[in-house]
Amino acid sequence: MNNNNIFQKIIHQEISAYKVAENSDHLAFLDINPIKIGHTLVIPKKNNRDKIFSLSEKEFISIMYFTRKVAIGIEKIIPCNRVGIFVMGFEIPHVHIHLIPMDKESDGNFSKKRMILSEKKFQILSEKIKKSIEIEFHQ
C-alpha cells in the first residue's frame, strides 16, 4: 500500500485542498478535477486501505454517516435532483467516496471531460458547502 499517495499528503497538510468538512476520522474536500460543480471526495484519515469493504463495520458505518452529512450540505448549495454516491477506488489506493450533484444518470459518467474551475470558484464553493454543513448539523 502506498502511504505517500495524494490523499495522505492532503491529510498531513503537505498539499492543500478545498475542505468542506472534517472531523478526527474523516475529511471531505472538493475534487480538483470535477465531473460536476460540487463534486466532493470523502476519505477516512486513519486507514490507508484501498477497498471500502475492507473497512471494519464500525469504520464503514462511520464514514457513511459522515458522507451523508456532506451530501446533505452539498444538496442545499448546488441545485440538483440528488447527490450521487460512487465508490470505485481504482486511481488512488486509498478508500474514497465521490459525491456528485446530479440531475440525470449521465452526470455520473467518469469518462467525460472534467471541468476546470478557478481557484476563486473553488474557494467560494468550498466555503458555501462548509457553512451549509455547519448550519445543518450545528457543528
Image (cartoon, rainbow, N blue to C red):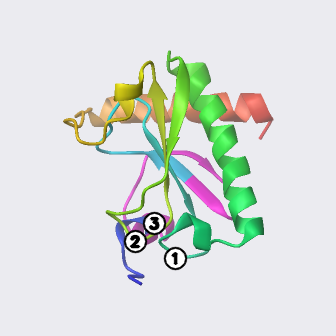
Q: Which mark is residue 117?
A: none
Residue located beneath label 2 in the image: 93
Residue located beneath label 1 in the image: 48
Disc 1 crowd rating (10 Å Cα; few below 14, some 14-19, many 20+) is some
Q: Secondary structure at mark 1?
A: loop
Kindly report the distance in space between the C-alpha atoms of the residues bearing marks 2 and 1: 8 Å
Q: Is residue 60 magenta?
A: no
Q: Earlier in the sequence, mark 2 or mark 1?
A: 1
Instruction: Check contact, mark 2 vs mark 1: CB within 8 A.
Output: yes
Kindly report the distance in space between the C-alpha atoms of the residues bearing marks 1 and 3: 16 Å
On screen, 112 above or below 62? above
Q: Which mark is residue 13?
A: 3
Instruction: Give the quadrant of residue 131.
Output: top right
Disc 2 crowd rating (10 Å Cα; few below 14, some 14-19, many 20+) is some
Q: Position of residue 81 (x, y in %)?
A: 53, 17
Q: Position of residue 25 (x, y in %)?
A: 67, 64
Q: Secondary structure at mark 3?
A: loop
